[in-house]
Image (tube, grey):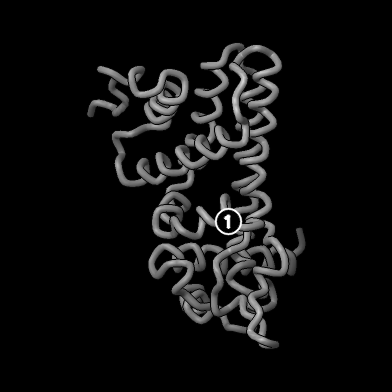
Amino acid sequence: MGVREQQKATNRQSIAQAALETFIEIGYEACTIRDIVRYSGLSPGTFYNYFESKEDVLDFILQDLAIRVRQTVRRERARATSGRDFIYQGFFAFLEEVGREPAILRMLSRNQTVFRNLVFGNAGALPPTADSVVALGGIDSSEQKDTRAATTVQGIFEDLGEDLNRAVETGHLPTMPATLVSMAMVGAGFEVLVRMSLDSSLTADGAARFLTDLFLGGLPGLDGRGYHSQE
C-alpha cells in the first residue's frame, strides 16, 4: 500500500472511530456529522471525501463485523451433530464474536432502537434522521433504499431461517415455524448481548447455555440452573 492509500485508510478509520465514540456518547439519532468531525479532529471536507452521511459511517463500522459474525456462526452451526449443539454453537459463536468488540457492545447498548430497526424494521430501513432527509420534499433517503448495514445485519436473520430449516431436514430439530423461531432467537440473542455489556459475570458460554436451555426446554428446563460466572 502506497503512502497516499495508507493516508486514506488512516483517515477513514479515524472518522469511523470518532463516529463510534460519538454514537456511544451522544447516541446515533442525536449526533450530527459536525459532532463526528469534532471528535475526529479532521475537517468537514475530509469527512465528505470518505462518507456521505452518518448512515454511511455506521455501514462501514458494521460491515466487517456483520460479515465475520455471519461466517463464524454459519460455520459453527454446520458442524453441529445434534439440536443442542446447533443452538448452543450458534448462540455462542454470535455472542463470542460480537463480545470481542467492547466498543461495539457499548454502541449496541446505547442505540438499541436503531439496531432493532436494522434487524426487524421495514425493509431494514434506519430510523429517520436529519442527515438522511433529502432536501426535495423532505423525503427520507432511508425509505428509498436499504443501507448496506441493514442488509448485512438482516442477513444474520435470513441465515438462521435457512439453517433452522436444514436442521429440521436432518432431524436435529423438530418441525417448527422457522420464521417465528428465527425472530425469537435473534431477538433473544440481541437482548442477552445487551445484558452482557452491562453484566461482566454473564459470559458468552453462560449466555449461550441459558438460551439453549430456554429454547429446547422452555421455562421448566431452567429450574435450578446457573449461568453467571462465579468471581
Left or right: where does residue 22 sit relative to residue 179? Answer: left
Q: Quadrant for residue 136, please give it.
A: bottom right
Q: Is residue 228 above or below residue 145?
A: above
Q: Residue furthest right?
A: 2
Q: Secondary structure at mark 1?
A: loop
Residue 58 appears in the rendering: yes
Residue 68 appears in the rendering: no
Instruction: Point out residue 32 in the picture as x, y percentages from the top left corner.
Output: 50, 78
Instruction: Point out residue 39 in the picture as x, y percentages from the top left corner.
Output: 46, 74
Q: Residue at x 70, y 17 (%)?
A: 169
Q: Is residue 156 above or below residue 146?
A: above
Q: Quadrant for residue 58, please give it.
A: bottom right
Q: Is residue 147 above or below residue 95?
A: below
Instruction: Point out residue 179 in the picture as x, y percentages from the top left corner.
Output: 62, 36
Instruction: Count numbered badges in the picture.
Output: 1
- The quarter of the picture where the C terminus appears is top left
Left or right: where does residue 182 sit relative to residue 198? Answer: right
- The quarter of the picture where the N terminus appears is bottom right
Q: Residue at x 62, y 74 (%)?
A: 53
Q: Can you identify the residue that label 1 sits on?
A: 121
| In-front residue for pair 174/32 | 174
| In-front residue for pair 153/43 | 153
Q: Residues within 10 Å of mark 1 (few under 14, many from 20)?
A: some
Q: Is residue 112 above or below residue 220?
A: below
Instruction: Point out residue 120 in the picture as x, y percentages from the top left corner.
Output: 56, 51
Amino acid marked by disc 1:
Gly
